[in-house]
Amino acid sequence: MGLKSLNQLELEHSCQAQLLSLGNSIHQHSLRIEDIGDYIPGSVMVQDLSSMTNTYMNQTGCDILKHSTEELALLGPAYFSTFFPAEEINILKSELQHFAMESDTGKIHSFFQRVRPDAQSEYKWYFTTSRLYPSDEFGEGLKMMHIAVPADTLSYAGRRLSNLVQDDALIRKNLHKFILLTLREKEVIRLIVEGKSSVEIANGLFLSIHTVNNHRKNIIHKLEVTSLSQLIKFAVAFGII
């Protein structure tokens, strides 16, 4: 793999890490997407997955698509066929549905996609990172947040995102490890950090001691941690606790 490819991967990794940190702040209610959306370098949208309708779009996204937030909301599911190639959107919708079914609010999903505002325009490549969005009210439908930046501006977008959230070197350094964790392993980490024993974890999650101990071994192997303090720092940085 050449230097150019490595640089591209680093840029993608930086954007993913910054979105993860930004998403943690939103989940902790220290930031609201409505307050910071217009400061993010790229299109920012929130979609209701039950109705496949946009519930939020920042000004940059509206300008790119040449539609207002209200107009985009009224499109409903037709939003996808209006702005994206049919042969690509079916694949992406399937991937995002699978991602949403995992119900892991701490996980991110990234992909490249082509977008155009109308049939007279050419498609342009964007790098999009998605994450499940916290519901404002109990019983509210599942939502997903997407941040899409032009593929040729990843470096600039990474720097701008970094200015919106606290620079977290631990997240950038360990994002590839975090991605390896399963939802169950994250549950076990949370309980370990809370001081629960293997027996208590097994009883709480209705698992056998053998299964819990295997989860512990896998967690240590994936994260390469050697102490409880390291595991706590990791869990706090990635919003597991």
Image (cartoon, rainbow, N blue to C red):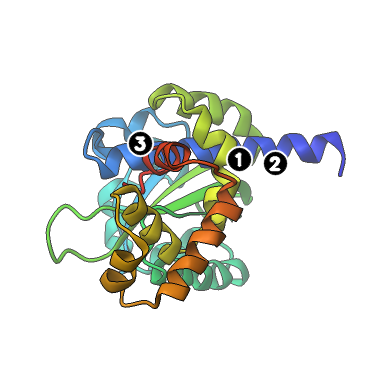
**Judging from the image, what secondary structure is the residue with disc 1 in?**
helix
Image point (49%, 69%), residue name: 93
Residue type at numbered disc 1: His
Asked if the residue under mark 3 is in contact with the one under mark 2, i.e. CB atoms within 8 Å, the reply is no
The answer to which of marks 3 and 1 sits earlier in the sequence is: 1
Q: Name the residue under label 2.
A: 9
Q: Give x and y (percent) for residue 72.
A: 33, 55
- Circle 3: residue type: Gln
Q: In which quarter of the image is residue 55?
A: bottom left
Crowdedness near tag 1: few (<14), some (14–19) or many (≥20) residues, C-alpha within 10 Å:
some
Residue 115 visible: no
Q: Name the residue under label 1.
A: 13
**Badge 2: residue crowd in 10 Å (few <14, some 14–19, many ≥20):** few
Vertical position of residue 102 compared to residue 187: above or below: below
Q: Residues within 10 Å of mark 3 (few under 14, many from 20)?
A: many
Which residue is located at x 34 percent, y 31 percent? Answer: 38
Q: Earlier in the sequence, mark 2 or mark 3?
A: 2
Tell us which disc is closer to us: 3 or 1.
1
Q: What residue type is disc 2 on?
A: Leu
What is the CA distance from the residue labelled 3 to the residue labelled 1?
25 Å
Residue 59 disc label: 3
Rendering quarter of residue 92: bottom right
- Left/right placement of residue 229 relative to residue 56 reads right
In the image, 114 versus 2, the foreground residue is 2
Q: In what element is the residue under mark 3?
A: helix
Please state if 87 lies on the left or on the right of 201 as rendered.
right
Q: What element carries label 2?
A: helix
Q: Are marks 1 and 2 in contact (CB under 8 Å)?
A: yes
Q: Nearer the viewer, mark 2 or mark 3?
A: 2
Can residue 74 be seen here? The reply is yes
Label pair 3/1, CB-CB below 8 angstroms: no
